[in-house]
Amino acid sequence: MVARLTLDQLVGVRVPIPQFFPFILKIRFVSLIFILCVISIRHAEAEESQSRPKWGIADKYRGDKGIDKDPNVIFIENFEDSSLDAVTSRWESIKSTEMMSLSTDTPEASGGKHSLLMTHIGGQGTGGHLYRRLSPGYEQLYVRFYVKFAPDCYPIHHFFHVGGYNPPTPWPQGGAGIRPTGHERFSTGIEPHGEKWRWDFYSYWMGMRSSPDKKSWGHDFINDENLKVERGQWTCIELMMKMNDPITETNGEMALWIDGRIISHLGKGFPKGKWIWDSFYPNPNGAPFEGFQWRNDQNLNLNYLWVLLYITKTPPGHISKVWFDDIVVARKYIGPIVSLEGE
Ligand SMILES: [Ca+2]
C-alpha cells in the first residue's frame, strides 16, 4: 500500500502492480517506473529544446518594437517608412523599383503598418531585389523574415539569399552552375523550389557535388514534399548559417526554422541521409552528413543579404505578388514576432 501510494504521487496515475509481487519487487517496480518517468520527461525536454530554442531575441520586444537596439541585432528592415525611397536608401543595390510598393498588408503579430510588395507582371522583366552588405562580415548569422505569396503567384525561380563574397561587393555576383573555389563566394537561398512549392535550401559552396549536366547547381537538403509553401498567408522564415573554423574543417552549419519550428539543422555528422546528385535526402539509414566547408580563406565570411524575387517563364500579363516584412539579422536566434496583444 505504501508503495502504491508513492507511485500514484510520483506519476499521477494509478499503475496496477501485480498482487503476486513480493514487497521488495514492488519497491523495485516502483523505482523502475519512477526512473522511466524521469527519463521520459528529460527526453521530452530535450526534444522540445531541439524543436525550438527556449527563447529568441524577439521574445523581449513585443511587435519587434525596439528590437533594433538589441546588442545582438545587426540590421533590421521593417519597411515602416513613409516612402519607398526612404526604404531603398538603406540598400546598396536595388533592381526594379517600379515593381515595388509599400503595402498595408502586414503579418498579424507585426507592430508595423507597412510591408514591401513586389508585383511582377508576366512578360515584363524577371523580378527585383534589394541587396546590401553586412559589414564587417560575420562568422555566424541568424536571418529572420516574413513572406507572403499571393494565392495565384506564379512559380519562383530563385528567392531570398544570404552569403558572402571575398572581397565583399555592393552588388550581387553571378556564378550560377559553377562550384566556388572556396576563397571567393558561398551562398544559401531559402527557396520555394519552383512548381513544387516546397521550402528548401539552395546552397553554393566549395564542397558542392556535381549535377547531372556536370555543372554544379544549388544543392537542396530537406526534400520533404509535405513542407509546402502556404500561399495566401504570412510565413516566418529564419535561416542560421555558421562558418567552418578552422578553414580546413567541414564544421560549418546551416539551419532553418519555419514559424518558430525547427525544420532542418545540418552540420558535421548530422543528420544522416543519402545524396542523389545535388540533392541530400535525410534518412536515418543513410550516412552522416559531411558538414560544410564553406571556405578555405579566412577573409570569406557572411557579409551580404539579398532580398530577391527572381521569376521567369510567367505567362504574359500574369500578375504575381509577393510581400516581405520584418527582416532581422542577428548574432543569436531571433524567433517569430510576439504579438503586441497582452502587453
Ligand atoms: Ca513592417
Image (cartoon, rainbow, N blue to C red):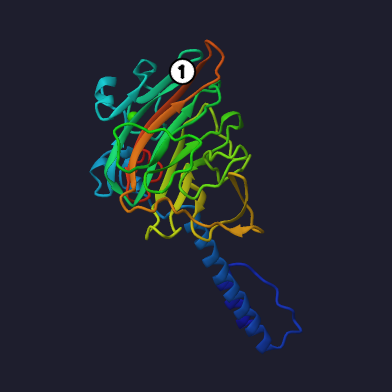
x and y percentages locating residue 150 in the rendered image: 51, 23
x and y percentages locating residue 248 in the rendered image: 41, 59
Q: Residue at x 50, y 52 (%)?
A: 265
The image quadrant where one finds the C terminus is top left
The image quadrant where one finds the N terminus is bottom right
Q: Does the rendering let one see residue 343? A: no
Compared across the picture, whether 32 is left or right of 173 comes to right
Q: Secondary structure at mark 1?
A: strand
The furthest residue to the right = 20
Q: Quadrant of residue 342?
A: top left
Q: Is residue 274 above or below residue 159?
A: below
Q: Is residue 310 above or below residue 134?
A: above
Q: Residue at x 42, y 37 (%)?
A: 161
Q: Residues within 10 Å of mark 1 (few under 14, many from 20)?
A: many
Compared across the picture, whether 339 is left or right of 266 comes to left
Closer to the camera in the image, 193 or 104: 193
| Residue at mark 1 | 120
Q: Does the rendering let one see residue 280? A: yes
x and y percentages locating residue 58 in the rendered image: 34, 45
Q: How many marks?
A: 1
Q: Is residue 286 above or below residue 241?
A: below
Compared across the picture, whether 184 is left or right of 5 comes to left
x and y percentages locating residue 310 in the rendered image: 46, 26
Closer to the camera in the image, 10 or 116: 116
Q: Is residue 70 above or below residue 309?
A: below
Amino acid type at circle 1 is His
Closer to the camera in the image, 340 or 27: 340
Q: Quadrant of residue 81?
A: top left
The furthest residue to the top = 317
Q: Residue at x 55, y 18 (%)?
A: 314
The quadrant where ligand 1 appears is top left
Closer to the camera in the image, 87 or 12: 87
